[in-house]
Image (cartoon, rainbow, N blue to C red):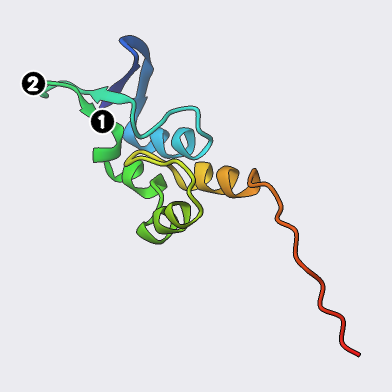
Amino acid sequence: MKVHIARDGVLLGKWTQTELYPLLRASELFPSDYYWHEGMTEWGRLAELPSGKSVLATPAQRQMLANHGLPFDEFTTKHQVSKLMDSRPCTDKTAVVHG
């Protein structure tokens, strides 16, 4: 069964559920995108599907972002966490000299 995917009211395409995971991992589709398939009465978020849930940031990752004051929401992905953490400015560490 093909799943229709839309973002900002624009249909992006149709894929099978097994095709969705690699697209989500590559950030070509996002958990916040909407999906619909035959038999549904309304559109849902990709984050509701198993493939969407699997790319979402874990509670520990969300806590780490919060601890560092970095922005996130319920649709932040593991990939986005990595990018956010990599983009943090370096902090100066004071060298301790003994002796």
Residue extending furthest right? 99
Estimate how packed mark 2 is, as few (under 14), some (14 to 19) or many (20 or more) residues with alpha carbons within 10 Å. few
Instruction: Residue at 35%, 58% (x, y): give it.
Output: 59
Give the percent coordinates (x, y) of residue 91: 70, 56
Q: Which disc is residue 76 wearing?
A: none
Q: Quadrant of the C terminus?
A: bottom right
- For residue 41, which numbered disc appears in the image? 2
Tell me the quarter of the picture where residue 10 sits: top left
Q: What residue is shown at x 28% (from left), y 24% (from top)?
A: 34
- x and y, in percent, of residue 89 in the image: 68, 47
Judge whether 78 appears above or below 3 on screen.
below
Q: Amino acid at mark 1?
A: Arg
Q: Which residue is mark 1?
A: 45
Element at label 1: strand
Q: Residue placed farthest to the front in the image? A: 99
Q: Secondary structure at mark 2?
A: loop
Q: Amino acid at mark 2?
A: Thr
| Image quadrant occupied by the N terminus | top left
Q: Is residue 31 above or below residue 3?
A: below
Residue shown at the point (35%, 38%) measured from the top left: 75
**Cα distance in 3D space between marks 1 and 2:** 13 Å
- Horizontally, is 48 left or right of 32 in the view? left
- Furthest residue toward bottom: 99
Figure check: 7 above or below 50: above
Q: Are marks 1 and 2 in contact (CB under 8 Å)?
A: no
Q: Is residue 47 left or right of residue 28?
A: left
Q: Position of residue 77 (x, y in %)?
A: 44, 43
Question: Percent position (x, y) of residue 9?
Answer: 30, 10
